[in-house]
Amino acid sequence: MTGSGGSALEVLAAGPGTTVQDLGRPGLASLGVGRSGAADTPSLRLANRLLGNHEGAAAVEVTLGGLTVRAVGGAHVALTGAPCPLAVDGRDAAANAVHWLPDGAELSLGMPPVGLRSYLAVRGGLDVPPVLGSRSRDTLAGLGPEPVTEGTVLPAGPAPQTDPVVDAAPIDPPTADEVVLRARLGPRDDWFTDEAVRTLFAQAYRLSSDSDRVGARLEGPALERGAGETSELPSEGMVLGSLQVPPSGQPTIFLADHPVTGGYPVIGVVDALDVPLAAQARPGQTVRFRRSAS
């Protein structure tokens, strides 16, 4: 089955954690529906700009490569984010560039040397059925298109009237070094000792392998609560980038599929512009926080 654009991508191998994502479902938290959407929104936007799409068009979010697709009807595509080794019918191709896939051509992604998440966009965007106004898969709530698996056919929508204006985007890949994230204290920093606050901004943490689109779990110095703060909060609203601290004292950075409410205190919030950096950090990578100037 192809979309109204007449082309599609047939998935031959899905790789781990492959989903369809756009810019999510903003404005529905009061109904208990999270925003979801691409974990690294700048990379999604770039892939769509390269193809002349609307920046919020749906694309494939790929975790650590492993995706192979076959073009049905021919399609222009672009890959951004974590720079996977990219091959079209066995020939090497570049990331952050526009490529034509003739009908029947196969595109394969290897494991990226740096970064975690890559975005494969098709001209016209992926025309899968929207749910509550978005084509994003919310892995926590189970909303949106089913996870991408072998045999999934992803139809493309009609090509936009505007043509792409560049062939490639010379941008830096995600860093393999220490990731520095700006953060602001609050709303519950008063639940923690002064030493915990100093520790948050002075010590390094390591990204745990027990991380996903919901949150980036960190391992490092425990953030201790103040005397008397042993109970849990009534559930309160959570936002993207919240640094929630469970009783273990090990903070978690809430990412795209975070819950809309939570009962553990939030010691701080990562700046929205830096959340994509956290989303591209790989297990074992070092993370540090510095106070936001804003």
Image (cartoon, rainbow, N blue to C red):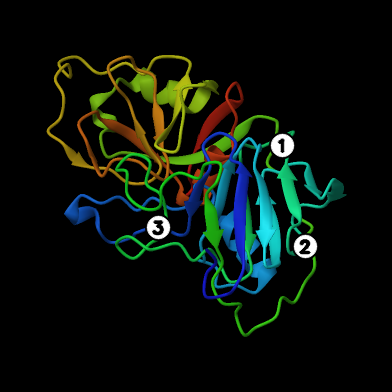
Residue occupying the point 48% across, 28% down: 201
Q: Are marks 2 and 1 in contact (CB under 8 Å)?
A: no
Q: Label 3 neighbourhood size at 10 Å, few (<14), some (14-19), many (20+)? A: many
Secondary structure beneath disc 3?
A: loop
Q: Nearer the viewer, residue 276 or 122?
A: 122
Badge 1 amino acid: Pro
Q: Position of residue 128 (x, y in %)?
A: 45, 62
Gap in Å between the C-alphas at discs 1 and 3? 25 Å
| Residue of label 2 | 99
- Asked if disc 1 and disc 3 are in contact, CB closer than 8 Å, the reply is no
The reply, left or right, for residue 268 in relation to residue 263 is: right
User: Is 250 on the left-hand or right-hand side of 236?
Assistant: right
The amino acid type found where label 3 is placed reads Gly
Give the residue type at disc 2: His
**Res 167 visible:** yes
Q: Secondary structure at mark 2?
A: strand
Q: Residue at x 57, y 24 (%)?
A: 283
User: Taking 269 as reference, is 58 above or below it?
Assistant: below
Q: Is residue 172 visible?
A: no
Foreground mark, 3 or 2, reads: 2
Instruction: Please identify, in this view, whether the residue under mark 2 or under mark 1 is nearer the observer.
Output: 2
Give the number of the disc on residue 112.
Answer: 1
Horizontal placement of 174 versus 99: left or right? left
Q: Earlier in the sequence, mark 1 or mark 3?
A: 3
Q: Is residue 258 above or below residue 119?
A: above
Q: Residues within 10 Å of mark 1 (few under 14, many from 20)?
A: some
Q: Which mark is residue 24?
A: 3
Residue 241 image position (x, y, % from top left): 41, 42
- Residue at image point 43% right, 53% down: 37
Residue 231, percent from left and from top: 14, 20
Q: Residue at x 40, y 52 (%)?
A: 145
